[in-house]
């Protein structure tokens, strides 16, 4: 059995474990406020309203929460809302689409963790790194609950991998 087939098999087992974990351990709704905020911007993009936000922050002014207006979303970087918007376009606007976005970035993170460790330390280190990151409780929680942290982790790992290509 070649190493590539072993890697694919381990990845499939990891995804199976992730699915089982997701079915029994995570809430059925989005519980991270950042995910809801980014999803709101993504929903506005998909609905053709532009890069707008429909939420406000608590400002101490009681009437602030009573406005039903949209504001230009000038502070959040566009990568996360656009990623979620692509999933909304594909699977519809739902909490599941948000979770699928973070699950996709989790799988991509695992792939680049494996590639980075394999490049520097060999096949065994790549597999062990894949397993260590793939079964980390906090990373699993973020990737299954719509937390945007996994997207940031992906960007960091991808950055390190791309930098390592020059060596």
Image: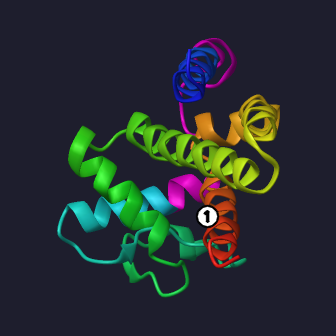
Residue under circle 1? Answer: 158
**Local crowd size for mark 1, using a 10 Å CA cut-off: few (<14), some (14–19), many (≥20):** some
Span colored in magenta:
20-37
Q: Toward which corner of the image does residue 27 lie, by quadrant? A: top right
Q: What is the quadrant of the N terminus in the image? A: top right
Residue 80 at what x, y percent from top left?
A: 48, 64
Pick the front one: 69 or 160: 160
| Image-based side of 163 in relation to 69, left or right | right
Residue at (38, 40) in percent of width and height? 97
Q: Is residue 130 magenta?
A: no
Write the residue at 48% across / 87% down: 74
In the image, residue 94 sits, relative to residue 50, either above or below, namely above
Residue 40 visible in image: yes
Colouring: rainbow
Task: Find residue 31 and report its image quarter.
Answer: top right
* 33 vs 103, nearest the viewer: 103
Tell me what residue is drawn at x 29 percent, y 49 percent. 88
Residue 50 to residue 110: above or below: below
In this rendering, does residue 69 appear at all?
A: no
Looking at the picture, does residue 152 appear above or below residue 150?
Answer: below
């Amino acid at each position: 059995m070649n190493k590539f087939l072993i890697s694919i098999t381990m990845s499939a087992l990891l995804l199976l474990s992730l699915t089982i974990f997701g079915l029994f351990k995570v809430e059925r709704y989005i519980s991270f406020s950042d995910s809801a905020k980014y999803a709101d911007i993504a929903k506005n993009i998909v609905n053709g309203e532009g890069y707008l936000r429909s939420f406000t922050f608590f400002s101490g002014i009681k009437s602030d929460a009573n406005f039903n207006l949209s504001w230009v979303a000038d502070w959040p970087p566009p990568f996360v809302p656009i990623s979620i918007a692509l999933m909304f376009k594909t699977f519809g606007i739902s909490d599941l689409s948000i979770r699928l976005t973070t699950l996709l970035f989790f799988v991509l993170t695992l792939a680049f963790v494996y590639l980075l460790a394999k490049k520097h330390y060999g096949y065994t280190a790549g597999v062990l790194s894949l397993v260590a990151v793939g079964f980390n409780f906090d990373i699993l929680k973020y990737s299954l609950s719509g937390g945007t942290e996994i997207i940031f982790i992906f960007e960091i790992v991808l950055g390190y991998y791309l930098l390592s290509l020059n060596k």
